Image: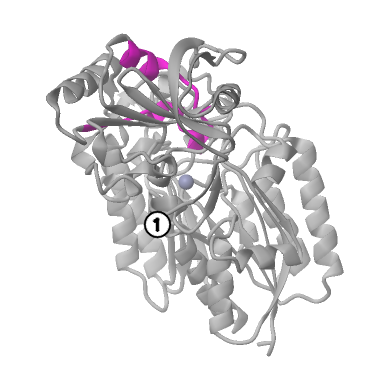
Amino acid sequence: MTTANPRIAILGMHLESNAFAPISTEADFRNSCYFEGEAMLIEAAKPAPNMPAEIPGFIEVMNATGPWQPVPIIIAATEPGGPAEQGFVDATLKRMRTMLDAAGPLDAIYICNHGAMTASASEDPDGALYAMAREVAGPSLPVLSSVDLHANISRRMFDSADCILSYRTNPHVDRRERGCEAATLMRRLLAGERWEKSMIRMPIKPPSVTLLTARGAYADMITEGQRHISADLPVVSILGGFVFGDVREGGITILIYGRGEKPKALLRQLAEFAWKERQRFRIQLTPLADAIARAEQAGRSGARNVVCLADVADNPGGGGRGNTTDILEGLLAERVQSVLLGNFVDPAAAARFHAAGVGATVRVTLNENCADAFGRAVPIEATVLALSKGIVAGRRGVYAGRTVDLGLAAAVRVGGLTMVVCSRRIQCADPVFFETFGLDIGAFASLVVKSRGHFRAGIDLWYSDDRIIEVDAGGLTSPVLEQFAWKRMPRPVWPLDMDTQWQAPAADAL
Ligand SMILES: [Zn+2]
C-alpha cells in the first residue's frame, strides 16, 4: 500500500463568504494570493509567505517525516468578502482539474481551504472542490483537508474527504500548526490507515463573537474534544460555522474520526453539551453611546490603555468594508482625546494624504464617493503624521510571520483622534499596523479596532480581555443577527429563534 516517494497534490481556495457583502472578484483573489504550480512552493519557502500558513506547515512536516514529492496545483485566497464570482470559481476548479489530470499518478490530495465559501450562483463551491478531488483520487487514495473553524461543512465535503481537520484557536494562531498536523495525519493515511467518520450538525448558528477559544462554551467544547484524542481517535473537529454565509448547511458541526465505540459516544456528548450550554451563544454588546462615553472618560483620565472598543460589526475579516462611521462620528462629536483607531479603509482618502505629504493639514471627506447607510460621508480636517506604501510584516497574533499589504496608507490626526487610513480591507489585528507609522498603542488612553476577535491576539500586551468591549454599532458583520434578511438559513435556529428545539439523534443515525 505504501509508496516510497508519495506524490501529493496540494490545492485550495480560501474565502469566507458573507452573503451581505459585495461579490469577491477574480481581482480580489489575484491581488491577495494566487499561486499556481512551482510558484506555490517558492512562496511557501519564503520567511513570511503570502499564503495560508497551513501550506508551509504541511510542507515542513512532510519534508521532516520522509520522502515525498509535492505536486503543487493552485492556492487562491482572499480576505473575507461577498460570494465569489461564479466564473472565477468555475475557471479555477476547471484549471485545478486540468492540472491534476496532467500531473500523472498521485498518491494523495491535500486540500487547504477555509470552508465557508459561497459563489454568486452556487451555495457550496467548497463541496464541488472536494467532490472533484475525490473523483481524481478515486475511492481509495487519501483526500485530507484542513479548514477554518468558521467553515460551514456541507455533507458533500464531509462525504468526499477521508478527514477534515479544523483550527482549534480563535483568534486563529494555530494555522501553521494545523498544517503540520495535517501532514502527520497524511503520513498515517498514506500508510493505509483509515478512520470511521461521524458528523452531527446542530441547529445553532452562533454569532462569531461567541466563538472565542480562550473562554466560553465553544472553548469548553474544544478542550473536551481534545481531551479524548488517542491513537484510535485522532481527530475531533468542532466547527462554529460562519453565520453570515447564510447557507443551508452551516452552524455548529462536530466531526469525529476514529475507531470503535468511543467516537460516536463523544459526538453525542459534545452535541448535548452545546445544546445544554446554548445560552452562552448569545451576545453581550455595549451600546454605542456607552462605549463612546467610556473612551471619553479614558481620554480625560490621563491614564493609558484604559479601554479597547472592538467595532465587531465592521470586521473586514468577516466581509465588513472597514469604513463604517458609527464609532468614528461618536468620537468626533464628543471630542474624545487620546484615542487611536485602525484600520479605516478609504483608498481615495489615503491617496489624498499621500498627495498632501507628511505634516500637511487637509480637508477630506471620508467615504466621499462610496457612502452608504453604515459608512456615511464624514468631513474631517486631518493632519498627516506618517505615510506608508502599506507592505508590513505581521509580528503578533494571526498575522505573525505573514506579509500583509494594507495598500497605500497613512496615519493622520483629527483633534484627539489618531487614525490609520488604508486602501485594502485588512482587519486591525496586529500592532504593526500602527507601529509601521511610529505609533505606539501604549501611548493612548483608548483604542478602536475594526476586527471581530483576531485583534485579541495582537493587542494582548496592552489590553487584557477585561478591558475590551464589543460595541453595538452598524455594519455588515454585526452580531445582532435579527437585523439581517436571511434567505437560505434553515429556521428555527438558535439564538435567532428562541423556540428552537433539538434532540440528540440515536447512535445509529450518526
Ligand atoms: Zn475563521
Horizontal and vertical percent position of residue 388: 53, 39
With 265 as the anchor, is 99 left or right in this view?
A: right
Residue at image point 27% right, 11% down: 334
With 202 as the anchor, is 69 left or right in this view?
A: right
**What type is the residue that disc 1 sits on?**
Arg
- Most extreme residue toward the front, as rendered? 359
- Most extreme residue toward the bottom, as rendered? 4
Q: On the image, numbered disc 1 is attached to which residue?
A: 168
Which quadrant is home to the N terminus?
bottom right
Above or below 288: residue 172? below
Q: Nearer the viewer, residue 4 or 349?
A: 349
Residue at image point 32% right, 44% down: 456
Residue at image point 32% right, 9% down: 333
For label 1, the crowd category at 10 Å Cα-Cα, with few meaning under 14, some 14 to 19 and many 20 or more, is many
| Label 1 CB-ligand 1 distance < 8 A | no
What number of labels is visible?
Answer: 1
Task: Tell me the SS state at disc 1.
Answer: loop
What is the magenta range?
Answer: 307-332
Horizontal and vertical percent position of residue 101: 84, 66
Residue 23 located within the stretch drawn in magenta: no
Q: Nearer the viewer, residue 346 or 371?
A: 346
Residue at image point 53% right, 19% down: 485
